Image (cartoon, helix red, strand yellow):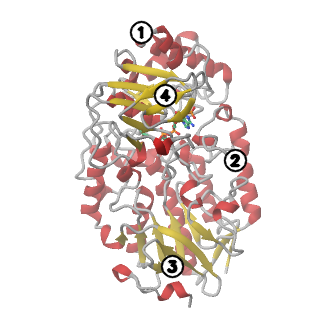
Amino acid sequence: ESESLRMPHPNGISEPLDILIVGAGFGGLYQLPIFRKLGYKVKIFEAAPDIGGTWYWNRYPGVRVDSPAPSYSFSAEETWKDWNWTEKYPSGEEIRAYFRHVEEKLGLKKDITFNMRVVSAEWDRGEDRWIVNTDTGAAVHPRFLVFATGALTVPYIPAFKGLDKYGGVYHHTGRWPEEGVDVRGKRVAVVGTGSSGVQIIQELGPEVGHLTVFQRTPNLCLPMGQGKLETRKELYPVLYRYRLQSFFGFLHNSYPKAYKSSTPEERILRLEEHWAKGGFEVNAPFPETGISQEVNDALYEFWLTKVRPRIRDPKMQELLAPTVAPHPVGAKRPALEQTYFEVFNQGNVDLVDLNKNPIAEFTSEGIVTGDGKEHEFDVIVLATGWDSVTGAMANIDIRGVGGQTVAEKWKGGLYTNLGMTVSGFPNMFFVYGPQAPTAFVNAPSCVEPQGDWIVGMIEHMRKNGLTKVEATTEAEQKWRGMVMTIYDMLLMKKSKGWWNGANIPGKPVEASSFPGGLPKYVQICAENADKGYDGFIFS
Ligand code: N01
C-alpha cells in the first residue's frame, strides 16, 4: 500500500472510495446523488468552504448569470418544485440562495469535504485505483476519479510590470472579497471588458467617484432582456428536455430560415424581433451568422445602428462600437448588458484604448500608460479572465500510466475522447472540460448528459466486473479531428479569446470545446454507450 494511504483521514474517509468527485459546482453536485442512490461510496472534495463552484467565488458587484432561468439550473424536479426565480437572469446572490435550497432538498453536504484542495493524483497500477492527495495531507484511494473543476476556475492576471508595487486595493473579479469593497467616491480602474468587466463597469459606474476603463477589445454586447420570470412550472419538464435539443443548451434554437432565402423585410423583422427579446439569440438570427462573413457583416451593421446612438461622445462611440468590426459577431463570447453603454455618458468615466496606449507599468499610486501618463487609483479591478477550460486540471499534478501529467499531455494541443476521458489516464473522467461543448453552451445543460454518460460507463463496468477503462489514442485522434473539422468552418477562428485559448500567452490556439452543438454531442455520446463504448479498452 502506498505511503500516502496511511496518512490520517479527516471526516472518516479511511475506507477506499468507489468514486471521488473533485468540485462542488453544478457538475459535481449533479453526479453525487445519482451515484449515492446507486449504492456507490462517493465523496466530493471541494477547495472552497461551500458549494456553488463558480458562484461561490464570483462575488464582484453586478455579477449575474446570462443564461435565462430556468435553463440555468438542475433538471431534477425536487430541486425546482418549490423554488421560484425572481428574475429571468438571476444575480449571483440569488444563485447562491438557490444552491442553499438544493442542499436543503438533497442533503449533499454530508458527502462533501470542504476546504480541501486536490493537489495531486497518481494512477496505482497494481490496484486499478487512483491515489489522490490534498493540501490538508489527507489522501484517498478511489477506483474512479471525476473532475468537475470548472472551465473558468483559475484566475489569469497578466504579468503587468510593477503590479506588486501598487499600494491601493486590487482584486481579480473571481476573487472579490465576500465582505465587498467600499468604492463609493473612490477613484476606480477596471482592466478588461469581457463579461466580468462589463457587469462590474455597469454596476460601479454610478457608484464610484471616478471610473477609468482600460479596454483592449470592445465587447460586442447584446441586450440582456432582463425581466420577471414568467415560465409556468408545468412546462419545466418539457423545457429541460428541450434544452438538450437546443444547439447552445438554452431554451431557444436557431431559426431554420436562411438569411440568403429571406427577403430584406424578413431579415429586418427577424433582427428587430431578436433584439427586442434580448439574450444570445441576438447572435443567431440566421443559421449562417457563425459561418458566413457576409451575413455576419449584416448583423454587425445592425448592431451598430442599435448601439452607437446610445453613446454620446464620438471618440468613445468609435472605441466601443467601431465602424470596422473588431472580430465577427459572436466569434468571441459577448456579454449581455443592460446599461453598459450609458455608463460611458457619465462625466466621471474615462475610457483608455490599450491598443493605442498600452499599460506600461503599475506604480505605488496606479497605472502608467504608454504615453507616460500616470493614472492614480484607490481601487483597481482586474477583469482579465481565466486560464480557462484546461487550467484547473493542468494545475493539479495528475499522473497517468506512464507518469506523464495531464498538463504535459495537453501542452501542444488537446487530446481527449468525447471530451470526458484521456488516454493514459484510466478511470478518470471530467465534465465541462476540453473538447466537450463547454465554452459554447449553457453549463448545467452540458454537465447533466455528461454526468449521465459517466454514470452509465461506471455502471457498465460494475455489471461486467471490470476494474479499468482507458480511452485509446486512435479514438482521441478521431475526436480531435472531428472538433477541428467543425471549428475550421467557423468564423470563430478569426477571434482571440478564452474560447480558443488565445487569451493565455503560450497556450495552443485551437478550439477549446466541441463546436458542433449540444444535441449532436449528446447523440454521439449516447451512440457510443449503445455500441458498448467504442474507443475504450476495458480490463
Ligand atoms: O474574462 P474574459 P471574463 N492587457 O477572458 C482583457 C463567463 N462569465 O471573466 O479581449 C489588457 O472574457 C481581455 O482583453 P481582450 C463567460 O463565459 C459569465 O470577463 O483579450 N487587457 C478581456 O477584455 C465569459 O466569457 C458571466 O483584448 C487584457 C478581459 O481582459 C467568461 O466567464 C459573467 C489583458 C478578459 O475577459 C470569462 O469572462 C462573467 C492584458 N494583458 C463571466 N489580458 C455571466 O454569465 C486580458 N485582458 C454573466
How far apart are the two marked residues, 3 and 2, measured between alpha carbons?
32 Å
Q: Classify 10 Å Cα crowding around label 2: few (below 14), some (14-19), many (20 and above).
A: some
> What type is the residue that disc 1 sits on?
Arg
The mark nearer the N terminus, 3 or 2, is 3
How far apart are the two marked residues, 1 and 3, measured between alpha carbons?
60 Å
> What type is the residue that disc 4 sits on?
Phe
The mark nearer the N terminus, 1 or 3, is 3
Camera-nearest residue between 165 and 387: 165
Q: Classify 10 Å Cα crowding around label 4: few (below 14), some (14-19), many (20 and above).
A: many
- Secondary structure beneath dot 3 equals loop
Kindly report which numbered mark, 1 or 3, lies closer to the viewer in this rendering.
1
Residue 258 in the image, given as x and y percentages of width and height: 61, 24
Q: Which residue is mark 3?
A: 142
Q: Which residue is mark 4?
A: 214
Q: Are marks 1 and 4 in contact (CB under 8 Å)?
A: no
Q: Are marks 4 and 3 in contact (CB under 8 Å)?
A: no
Residue 423 is left or right of residue 176, and the answer is right
